[in-house]
Image (tube, rainbow, N blue to C red):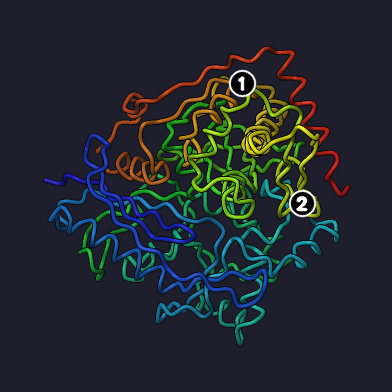
Amino acid sequence: MQKYIMALDQGTTSSRCILFDKKGSICSMAQMEFTQIFPKPGWVEHDPMEIWSTQIAVAAKAMGKLGVTEKDIAAIGITNQRETTIVWEKATGKPVYNAIVWQCRRTAEKAEELAKDGFGDEIHKKTGLIPDAYFSATKLAWILDHVEQGRERARSGELLFGTVDTWLIWKLTGGQVHVTDYTNASRTMLFDIHKRRWDTEILQKLDIPCEMLPEVKPSSTVYGYTKDCLIGDGIAIAGAAGDQQAALFGQCCFRSGEVKNTYGTGCFLLMNTGDWPVISGNGLLTTIAAGVGDQVPYALEGSVFVAGAAIQWLRDDLRMIDRAAESEIWCRKVEDANGIYVVPAFTGLGAPYWDEKATASISGITRTTGKAEVIKAALDCIAYQITDLVRAMEQDTGMRIEELRVDGGPTRNGYLMQFQSDITNKRVKIPDAEELSGIGAAYMAGISAGVYDLEKLAGNMKRSVYEPKMDDEIREKKYAGWKAAVDGVLSK
């Protein structure tokens, strides 16, 4: 009897496999880091074959811990680093170039050209995205520019393109299935999210042959079956979604207006907007959320560049703390940051400002400013940036957000979570489970395989709750101070 759902969580720095039982509980996990390649400043690459070898190795290891075989696995779900771009030969399965990672900035000038040509509005209207090197489109065009006869080979059907989910499904099925899901397609800057198809005009603008693009399917459906791979044959691959959409699904944000925030090095805040693709007037991105079957919900997404990285900065650069957990102790030594604001624009500011030339600052310092106030302000800036996104989402949608469902390492900081609740004036809910992207992938595959019931999933997860306690007048005064501090670093 099939007992487990397998989630393959292919991230930016490591590949992970998690096995879940029929109740949705984690039973086994394995993880392996892989090489980060930096050919030039601002360039980031991965070896696609190493992505594959580490992912299949951890899958075998997680199965080995429980002594299970392919007969015990009901389905596989995949979640992945988004936008990372891979091109390979159809006949041999050999990559023609390293994977160009989402972080890579080599195509920034090409993205700027699209905006300057007046094509940016068309891209935004169709894809929900803002022209940027972050997305797959210009990365793919760059590979075709730099591989000998790249476009000719692509047009003749010799070369295939995929994001990491597509690459893994291709490898798992022994080269039989070339497919992606709606969420990953929506992050390529090549996909019309309204018509749900690859956009001919954008493809022509970048001279990308349509013959090399994968078929696009729902996030929770059977794509194919494993063949000729280490973990065995015949396992259904039944779910796939980009990591942030998978986390939204894992947080059980199934209804319009429900919001999750993932705290990591940066932050990703996503709101499920249901059947309504909201085109933001506040610098947010419109994308497709993971759905069940033929359901294709939409989402608004805002990204913050520096969140957990602000705590790392306190530890590694300022040497104010030895461990991340110490930041909470110092925050509780003083009642207030006393007018100190840290704006962590170390690499510019993300949504809703999108100012890559903004510079970081610490403002409001007086003779009595001490270490505790600076540490407190550094944590507060994380919550202020999320508040920017929450207010932008409410303005774009006209919907009031009632609560934030949050995950990630910084959620263990009780001070930060209470301040997040206070400054947003929202309830903050933290699940007792971690690995929300993996949980989302497992849920999607499990639903498709008939193992999980969508209605019962939301009730499975226990959560701790923070309620807002701050006076409205104090909240608005603090937030006004934050906005003034941000205005002081913007380049525009």
- The residue lying toward the viewer, choosing from 3 and 275, is 3
Residue that mark 2 sits on = 122
Tell me the kind of residue under disc 2. Answer: Glu
- The residue lying toward the viewer, choosing from 325 and 244, is 325
Could you tell me which secondary element the residue under label 2 belongs to?
A: helix
Res 308 quadrant in image: top right
In this view, the mark in front (2 or 1)? 1
What x and y, as percent, mark residue 192? 63, 50
392 lies left or right of 194 = right
What x and y, as percent, mark residue 331? 58, 31
How far is disc 2 from disc 1 in space, using C-alphas? 39 Å
Residue at x 66% of width, y 74% of height? 142
Residue at x 49% of width, y 29% of height? 414
Residue at x 34% of width, y 28% of height? 461
Q: Is residue 350 above or below residue 115?
A: above
Res 383 quadrant in image: top right
Tell me the kind of residue under disc 1. Answer: Asp
What x and y, as percent, mark residue 104? 63, 65
| Number of residues whose C-alpha sits closer than 10 Å to that of mark 1, classed few (under 14), some (14–19) or many (20 or more) | many
Residue that mark 1 sits on = 422
Q: Is residue 94 above or below residue 373?
A: below
Could you tell me which secondary element the residue under label 1 belongs to?
A: helix
